[in-house]
């Protein structure tokens, strides 16, 4: 694998873009080496600027659940673009995708579209604070809800990868209203509610954590959060930017049978274009301007081009009845194969998986929260990352991230990947 062109492009990028990237996790800082510049992607494969073909296990961090350049999505974008890309005025397609999302996802009556997962989560918190007339929020160490100030406290994903889970620039005034709990630790949540009576507007959580690697909720954990929020008059917010439309048609709420008060979306809902959204039952959503007092807005929110991509994606998902069975089977196959070759090569590891979200940790003990996620051996992870990359397999360039499996992967791709993992570690 040669990376001359990527290296050259990176040197050019660094002159005019901070760190040469428009999002830090792309910079390969935690694994070292030069970030790969992509020329094109089709199906399960990336083609980089040096002509290398890579099996993609990140898929733009989740959106490409049906594969890159998915024909119905591309067709919808091309057709819509010829009619104009954004008007700043209502269009029918916004209602069409909103109605479809409301039909697919439980416990929501209305949805507001925005341009990113960050915007969705930021708006959801403001709505919860306005609706409850309270100021504090609870988040979990290692969870990432985008880069708005309230969330950059012990945040996961790129924030923890670069050792800045508490970013400079976030004021003490903001930080004091963000309370921190431990994932899978109901007692840490109970203690915060008891210490802050009638002050907590909402608890926001990734129902399956994907930003400290993939971490599953323990049996009863999400139900426990539901009960605590109900008991203390706080809203339960499921950040389903990753899990929405990925774990099930109705996301984690459907999979776990736990009803959130507000749900946020991103990634899959936009089919690869910039779309985020937040949704809730009518009485909460009607608190939003222009009918309610909580202000939230956006020039490009609901623009017809992004809506066309998102609608084509959701329609494809909605009509594909065994999609989630296929995704689960492929990811389980990959999990079994990697467990076998890592064990045969005596590599201490833990693999966490649910549906088409999977992570490998290089530590033999269970990984169930932020602290245990940090125990893995990063040198082994770097060997794993670069060993796979040079064998044509692209995984997340950080152990604090999750792999996202696409339905475009074949079992030959999976066998190739398992053989590559074996090759990296064989003695
Ligand atoms: P965006 O603003 O990046 O669209 O969404 C923020 C966000 C919110 N909630 C969850 C659960 C998320 O995973 C994300 C974004 N995920 C990261 C990947 N760990 C995006 C990749 C990046 O930062 O470049």
Image: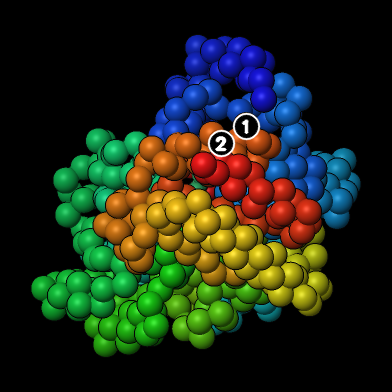
Residue linked to disc 1? 390
Q: Are marks 2 and 1 in contact (CB under 8 Å)?
A: yes
- Name the side, left or right, on which 230 lies relative to 41: left
221 above or below 309?
A: below
Residue linked to disc 2? 387
Q: Look at the image and tell me whether residue 243 can be seen.
A: yes
Quarter assignment of residue 69: top right
Q: Look at the image and tell me whether residue 25 can be seen.
A: no
Q: How is the image coloured?
A: rainbow
- Name the side, left or right, on which 135 lies relative to 366: left
Provide the secondary structure element on which disc 1 rests.
helix
Respond yes or no on whether mark 2 lies under 8 Å from ligand 1: no
What's the residue at 71%, 23% (across, down)? 49
x, y percent for residue 351: 48, 61
x, y percent for residue 54: 70, 38
x, y percent for residue 89: 69, 51
């Amino acid at each position: 694998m040669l990376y001359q062109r990527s290296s050259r492009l990176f040197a050019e990028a660094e002159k005019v873009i901070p760190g040469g990237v428009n999002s830090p996790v792309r910079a390969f800082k935690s694994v070292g080496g030069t970030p790969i510049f992509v020329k094109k992607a089709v199906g399960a494969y990336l083609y980089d600027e040096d002509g290398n073909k890579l099996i993609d296990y990140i898929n733009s961090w989740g959106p490409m659940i049906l594969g890159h350049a998915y024909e119905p999505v591309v067709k919808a974008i091309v057709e819509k673009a010829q009619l104009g890309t954004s008007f700043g005025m209502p269009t029918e397609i916004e209602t069409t995708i909103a109605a479809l999302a409301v039909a697919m996802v439980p416990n929501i009556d209305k949805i507001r579209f925005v341009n990113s997962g960050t915007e969705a989560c930021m708006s959801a918190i403001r709505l919860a604070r306005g609706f409850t007339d309270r100021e504090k929020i609870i988040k979990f160490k290692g969870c990432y809800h985008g880069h708005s100030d309230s969330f950059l406290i012990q945040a996961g994903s790129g924030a923890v990868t670069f050792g800045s889970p508490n970013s400079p620039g976030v004021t003490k005034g903001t930080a004091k209203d963000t309370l921190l709990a431990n994932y899978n630790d109901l007692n840490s949540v109970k203690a915060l509610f008891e210490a802050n009576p009638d002050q907590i507007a909402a608890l926001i959580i990734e129902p399956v954590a994907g930003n400290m690697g993939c971490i599953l909720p323990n049996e009863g954990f999400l139900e426990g959060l539901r009960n605590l929020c109900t008991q203390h008059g706080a809203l339960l917010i499921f950040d389903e930017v990753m899990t929405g439309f990925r774990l099930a048609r109705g996301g984690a709420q459907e999979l776990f049978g736990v009803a959130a008060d507000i749900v946020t979306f991103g990634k899959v809902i936009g089919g690869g274009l910039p779309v985020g959204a937040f949704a809730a039952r009518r009485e909460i959503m009607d608190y939003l301007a222009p009918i309610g007092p909580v202000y939230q807005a956006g020039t490009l929110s609901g623009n017809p081009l992004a809506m066309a991509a998102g609608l084509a994606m959701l329609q494809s998902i909605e009509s594909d009845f065994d999609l989630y069975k296929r995704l689960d089977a492929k990811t389980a196959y990959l999990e079994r194969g990697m467990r076998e070759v890592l064990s045969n090569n005596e590599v201490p590891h833990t693999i966490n998986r649910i549906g088409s979200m999977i992570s490998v940790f290089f530590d033999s003990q269970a990984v169930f929260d932020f602290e245990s996620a940090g125990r893995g051996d990063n040198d082994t992870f770097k060997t794993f990352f670069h060993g796979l990359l040079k064998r044509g397999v692209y995984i997340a360039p950080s152990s604090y991230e999750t792999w996202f499996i696409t339905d475009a992967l074949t079992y030959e791709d999976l066998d190739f990947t398992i053989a590559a993992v074996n090759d990296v570690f064989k003695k």
